[in-house]
Image: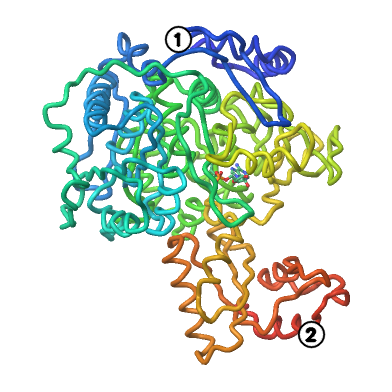
Amino acid sequence: MSYRITNLRDYANEYHKSVTSPEKFWSEIAEQFDWKKKWDQVLNWDFETPQVNWFENAELNLTENIFERLLPTHKNKTAIIWEPNDPEADSIKLTYGELFKAICKFANAMKSQGVKKGDRVIIYMPMVPEAAIAMLACARIGAVHSVVFAGFSASALADRINDCEAKMVLTSDGNFRGNKNIPVKAVVDEALNHSDFVENVIVLKRTGEKVKMTPGRDLWWEEVLEGQSEQHEAEVMNAEDLLFILYTSGSTGKPKGVVHTTAGYMVFTYYSFLNVFQYDADDVYWCSADIGWITGHSYIVYGPLLAGATTLMFEGVPTYPHAGRFWEIVEKYKVNQFYTAPTAIRALQVYGTEPVEKFDLSSLKVIGSVGEPINEEAWHWYHEHVGKGNCPLVDTWWQTETGGIMISPLAGITPNKPAHASLPLPGVQPVIVDAEGNELTGNNVEGNLCIKYPWPSMIRTTYGDHQRCKDTYFSSYKGMYFTGDGVKRDHDGYLRILGRVDDVINVSGHRMGTAEVENAIDEHPDVVESAVVGYPHEIKGQGIYAFAICDASDKSDQILEDEIKQLVRKIIGPIAKPEHVQIVSGLPKTRSGKIMRRILRKVASRDLSNLGDISTLLNSEVVEDIIKGANLD
Ligand code: WT7
């Protein structure tokens, strides 16, 4: 654990080193891993292209760095603790030794079905250990996994399968979530009606739900495992070979496949995990995210396991069967580090402090937050009632594209400041720029957040469309990666993230592109045009508010509103369903025909005090109509 920073001065030294000699800094950390072949060059980069190669020409397998590297010391240590949805059901503990066997077996099983290095495999599964096993088995054989959150609809799943031309889908019969039993395989079946690439579907039995198995295509998990060896020789991977693709929304319509590669991601997730959470050898660490999101990839599976940690996976939801479920789990396993999203905190805040006080949380040493700006009220509630005022709270800012935590306090080292992500991790060089791209130095400045130097776990491309990667992230400001977030550096030099500055809405920590939701709404036969904006929502952070023109429809507004909500739910999934739909006669437009979202945002936020100058609009008369019809309850 020599790369764990232990005090503030240490942090300052390491940060300085990481900026003045980044290659030396990262190669020293990389040295402790097992490489089949060392790199020729630590970093080769050009943000214009963009092209970023870390540990160029090195060879390795990431899973060897979890298992072969750690087994001599960690064979009997618990790697994964799995807590089921139902507190009465049996939990599972897998040691590093057992997990390794399970991964090798499943790696052999996938290979026997013809999956080869470079093939894409979709993982559409509940939060069960097999999902993590599947990810690692892919990494073992060099297949590229793409985990799709099991709450996404069939058409969202089909889009992702088709975009990466997946050869295999790993799934389950159903998914226990709270008091629901959600069909999973049935969604895959529907998605595959719109896809030609998938050769096999492997189905895990979880709920016992009856499912349709298509002969020749669908196989049971236990069936493919039969007779497979528990040994597997890891595939040799290049440092820059694809590790996984994870789809995420942006300002344009179609979700993009963010590509992460092997060595840089390994080094950075390991390093950031250890330092942000200050993990000690016998700690039990729990991140409550879903593996369908980047947080689950980097900080349930890869980072913790590379650091030899015990990582807890929870199948259920925070409020089932009661609002103290999270705290019950903390008590049960004596969790030391707990990492969740502000939306979960706000949702639990509603139930008061009684459910928190019922359980013994004295094991907690560190609490963490991720996914959206944490408001001060939630920060204080979390700090006081969960952390009992004496756990450092790490507010971690990062993105699917950054692969790992970029700006965050280091637990117990960086002084806490509510609602501030605070300082960059070593190796991360954030800059604040104004609209023209000038760097704003000094304190008390506000602008757009960019990163001006490569870090090992950064996005390499958007799958199948490199130009899109360039346009989205590397074209707004010359020579920099643009995050899409606004940021403020306060008088102490601490960074506070202000939220998205683009057309992205953050609903419960999940990123939704306005264009993506609008495209779904426009599928409704009566919708002529639509516009979607975000507005402040007490629990979700932001809610989705949709405006739609349905001129010639003979349906009532109420019916249209319901149909539109259901349609979005069906096309994208429940998380994208608008909170409000308002049928309008027109949308405010500039003379060049651009929708004035600023005005719609004001209406949706019930903030009509200062609409700004609307006289330049093409159709200023619609504004009054929109205000009158607004759903402001
Ligand atoms: C966007 C990235 C990183 C994993 C979960 C979300 C927002 C994330 C914070 C934070 C303020 C945050 C940003 C970012 N965000 N963490 N601690 N404080 N904002 O991943 O879906 O890729 O979304 O989430 O706006 O750009 P994602």
User: Residue 96's image quarter?
Assistant: top left
At mark 2, the secondary structure is helix
> What's the residue type where badge 2 is placed?
Glu
Residue 628 is left or right of residue 281, and the answer is right
Type of amino acid under label 1: Trp
Point out residue 238 in the picture as x, y percentages from the top left corner. 47, 18
Residue appearing at x 67%, y 29% in the figure: 424
Ligand 1 is found in which quarter of the picture? Answer: top right
The reply to whether callout 2 and callout 1 are in contact (CB within 8 Å) is: no
Q: What is the x, y in percent for residue 486? A: 73, 46
Residue bearing mark 2: 621
Report the residue at 64% width, 65% height from top.
533
| Distance (Cα) linking label 2 and label 1 | 67 Å
Which mark identifies residue 553? none
Mark 1, Cα crowd under 10 Å, few <14 / some 14-19 / many 20+, is many
Give the colour scheme shown.
Answer: rainbow
Occupied quadrant, residue 415:
top right
Residue depicted at x 61% and y 52%: 377
Quadrant of the snapshot with the C terminus: bottom right
Which sits in the foreground, 276 or 517?
Answer: 517
Q: Is residue 125 visible?
A: yes
In the image, is residue 534 above or below residue 284?
A: below
Q: Position of residue 261 (x, y in %)?
A: 51, 27
Q: Which residue is drawn at 16% across and 50% down?
A: 215
* 560 with respect to 427 (left or right): left
Q: Earlier in the sequence, mark 2 or mark 1?
A: 1
Can you identify the residue that label 1 sits on?
35
Residue 143 percent coordinates (x, y): 37, 30
**Vertical arrangement, residue 87 with respect to residue 137, above or below:** below
